[in-house]
Amino acid sequence: MTEETKDTENTAFRNRRCPSGSVSSERKVRIQKAEIRMMKTVRQIVQETINTVYPKYYPEGAVSFFLAHHSDGRIRDDIESGNVYLLYEDEVPAATVTLSGCHIQRLFVLPEYQHRGYGRKLMDFAETMISDVYGYAEADSSLAAKQMYITRGYKETEYHTVRTDNGDFLCYDVMRKTFKDSNTEV
């Protein structure tokens, strides 16, 4: 990997644009497995989305917890394990998802790319990958994402609360979707 390759990835992220409107046939959208050189891009998508969206749903301590939870070490480990994917719009990174076994994790779409169907595209991709091996998919759902999971047929299987370092509480659900046409055991 050359410095030029790193610079191209980072420049595309920094210079991303926000065209108005929904996804059109003119936009090229692709999903690619992340490489270690893309770690900074994944981190930026995660942190920017958490910092912009999560304060609408959670207290400050919970937002800080999410930021710490999605640490560089965890992102690096997941990339090195081949579990992280990036969605690009016109060669600009716009979203990310991590797959670990039957678990969908770290699904984030940059705020300026939300409401274009990219979360749905990543979920379609994730569910296809998972259903090839497992009879179900699971996700730990933030309050911000819960309705999306319910709409896609996920059911709540567990409810958790975590007390953060400053005493705030973080609440989330474990969601599960069983695939009807699966030949795998549940």
Image (cartoon, helix red, strand yellow):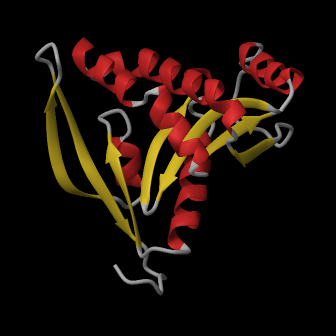
x, y (%) of residue 176? Answer: 32, 61
Q: Between 126 and 145, which is closer to the camera in this rendering? A: 126
**Residue 119: which quarter of the image?**
top right
Locate residue 101: give its quadrant. Answer: bottom left
What residue is shown at x 16% (from left), y 47% (from top)?
Answer: 159
In this orientation, does residue 53 appear? Answer: yes
Q: How many labels does the image show?
A: 0
Image-quadrant location for residue 114: top right
Query: Could you tell me which quadrant the N terminus lies in?
Result: top right
Q: Position of residue 165 (x, y in %)?
A: 17, 18
User: Is 60 rendered above or below residue 89?
Assistant: above
Q: Is residue 142 above or below residue 183?
A: above
Q: Looking at the picture, how far across and down is residue 86, in whole percent?
A: 66, 40
Left or right, residue 161 beside residue 29:
left
- Residue under the point 42% across and 30% down: 70
Q: Choose between 2 and 26: the one closer to the eye.
A: 2
Can residue 119 be seen at all in this image of the molecule?
A: no
Quadrant, the C terminus: bottom left
Residue under the point 72% across and 47% down: 32
37 lies above or below 131 = above
Whether residue 111 sits left or right of residue 9 in the image: it is left
**x%, y% of residue 35?**
70, 40
On screen, residue 130 versus residue 26, left or right, reads: left
